[in-house]
Image: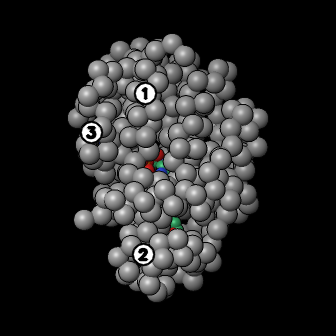
Amino acid sequence: MKSKRILVTGGAGFLGSHLCERLVRGGHDVICLDNYFTGRKKNVEHLMDFHNFELMRHDITFPIFVEVDQVYNLACPASPVHYQHNAVKTIKTSVMGAINVLGLAKRVKARVLQASTSEIYGDPTQHPQQETYWGNVNPIGFRSCYDEGKRVAETLFFDYHRMNDVDIRIMRIFNTYGPRMHPDDGRVVSNFIVQALKNNDITVYGDGSQTRSFCYVDDLIEGMIRLMNKDGFNGPVNVGNPGEFTIKELAEKVIELVGSSSMVIYKPLPSDDPRQRRPDITLAKEKLDWQPEIKLEQGLRKTIKYFKDNLD
Ligand code: NAD
Ligand code: UDP
């Protein structure tokens, strides 16, 4: 592929750092933009010596002007603990961030990909979730700053596309895990692994019968790059692993793989916590020739190794 100038917002975060790495190694000129709210310079420090990698401290709620061919818009805290920490800032990041990257894409005629989410579907009444489903989202709850912010962002992407012919891509990402997740971000995979490694209690919220479908980061990034470079297809498209597990099953699997003496304890279920979630990936298979390769156990082993090597 010809070398491109690429902006990655949220590039120092978990997914962003893996994306930057793939793009830099692919020979592209990469600008990693981040305000370091949940991201860390450490996530990209191994890229600093590459001449085709640049780091830019910037808050995406403010306009930006750079000459680029592609924009991946990942800037937004993703874990419920982090995005609820400052709910107003979260929704501003999704909405004003979308306006700013779309304005940029319009001016410089760049293609722009939005990292959207399965939260678009809320607590889904359709299972598995297809892209045609409009969702079941509480507009005034604790998760709304994230869910509704991401929904407005999708609306803005399609409006800029229809009104200004901006070349958009929308990817609905389902729960993704792997190395460089923040150990304190409160997401279930990182929480369970850190707890298991420290032989602390494993905190299952509710009775643990709610389900999620977990995608390993390398599979996800492959899908993201394919979507960006696919001509004539805007999405939205689900990208995730259809393997569905209860949270209790995940807890047991992590304890087994770590060889931990942790016990499972039960805590109250947070409000509006979706009961079930599994992507229908028929569209991704058809349009992107993409499907995940890495099974949960294999991905968990790699992630456990990362946390083992990096925990103080
Ligand atoms: P993350 O929190 O590790 O990364 C988000 C990055 O955005 C961080 O580096 C953070 O510092 C940066 N950021 C936040 N607000 C910003 C702002 N105002 N200006 C500039 N940078 C800002 O989370 P992640 O898991 O890497 O998620 C990346 C994107 O993918 C997010 O948009 C998220 O909503 C989306 N997503 C992730 C998942 C998942 O399971 N990981 C699922 C669905 C959607
Ligand atoms: N969860 C849990 N224990 C934890 C963290 C999360 O049981 O220590 C549950 C949470 O209630 C939810 C699921 O795991 O049902 C996934 O949570 P996460 O925050 O990772 O993502 P999301 O809810 O956004 O899918």
Identify which amino acid the numbered label 1 is placed on: Arg
Whole-percent x, y for residue 110 in the image:
47, 18
Residue located beneath label 3 in the image: 45
The residue positioned 48% from the left and 56% from the top of the image is 302
The residue positioned 69% from the left and 55% from the top of the image is 242
Identify which amino acid the numbered label 3 is placed on: Glu
Labels 1 and 3 touching (C-beta < 8 A): no
Q: Quadrant of the N terminus?
A: top right
Residue located beneath label 2 in the image: 196
Residue located beneath label 1 in the image: 25
Whole-percent x, y for residue 252 in the image:
56, 77
The residue positioned 33% from the left and 21% from the top of the image is 52
Q: Is residue 175 visible?
A: no
In the image, is 33 to the left or to the right of 165?
A: left
Identify which amino acid the numbered label 2 is placed on: Ala
Q: Is residue 31 visible?
A: yes
